[in-house]
Image (cartoon, rainbow, N blue to C red):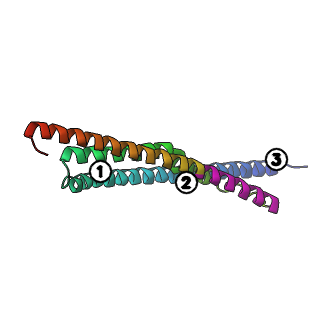
Amino acid sequence: MFDREEYEYLLADLQEYGRTRWEQAKLTLLDKVSRIAGLLLLGLAVILIVFALVAFGGVALISALSDCMPVWAASLIVAALWIILLVVVISLRRQLFINPMLAAIAAILFTGQPKRKLTVEKVQQESEMLAYKAGEQEKQLNRETERIRRSWIGLFERFATVRSLLDRVIERIFGRK
């Protein structure tokens, strides 16, 4: 059937095909790793810029509030604001950071995969699932908003109590209000 020369030719072609596929796989991996690294570096840069904005914003807010109250009170208010912001960010970390990052990494890793064929039923199912998830997230945000509102009310009540105590102490020390 095949002579030795045809086998050698076929074997050489097979080896060349294997080397080409290996090089293609390495290039594809390099492309995906570099895109993921770029995405992570972009995330790090955004986090650093947001941190700088928050820090300088806090200093500016303390400066603005110190015109109508002592600096220590303005600092406590700003610190309370940052703690509340931190609690909100931590509680929403999955929606804000994890899910978008995983989606972006999955899109990078699984590009070139065959697309799913969409049917009317699948689109309806996915839209219903998205509507359900949106409703659940809205409920969770409403609960979190109410919790934060109650925290603010409690914080202002505590500040009012501290202010009235300070007024009494100042009145006793100086004999005036």
Marks 2, 1: nearer the viewer: 1
| Mark 2 / mark 3, whichever is N-terminal | 3
Q: Tell me the crowding category of disc 3: few under 14, some 14 to 19, or many 20 or more residues within 10 angstroms, Cα based.
A: few
Q: Amino acid at mark 1?
A: Ala
Q: Amino acid at mark 3?
A: Arg
SS at mark 3 in the image: helix
C-alpha distance separating marks 3 and 1: 76 Å
Please give the residue where the numbered disc 2 appears in the rendered image: 31
Q: Give whichever of 61, 14 is nearer the camera.
A: 61
The percent position of residue 173, horizontal first and vertical second, equals 10, 37
Q: Are marks 2 and 1 in contact (CB under 8 Å)?
A: no
Whether residue 154 is in magenta: the answer is no
List the single residue furthest toward the front: 175
Instruction: Provide the residue designation for mark 1.
Output: 55
Which residue carries the number 3 mark? Answer: 4
Membership of 132 in magenta stretch: yes
Label 2 and label 3: CA atoms lie apart by: 40 Å
Task: Residue 97: give its label.
Answer: none
Farthest residue, direction left: 174
Mark closer to the chain start, 3 or 1: 3
Q: Residue at x 24, y 56 (%)?
A: 60
Q: Position of residue 176 (x, y in %)?
A: 10, 44
Q: Which residues are magenta?
A: 119-138
Residue positioned 49% across, 53% down in the render: 39
Pointer 2: residues within 10 angstroms few (<14), some, or many (20+)? Answer: some
Disc 1 packing (10 Å; few <14; some 14–19; many ≥20): few
Q: Is residue 114 visible?
A: no
- Disc 2 vs disc 3: which is toward the camera? 2
Estimate the spatial distance between the alpha carbons at disc 2 and disc 1, rounded to whole Å: 36 Å
Residue shown at 26%/40% (left/top)? 162
Three-letter amino acid code at the position of disc 2: Asp
Task: Tell which of 24 and 116 is nearer to you.
Answer: 116
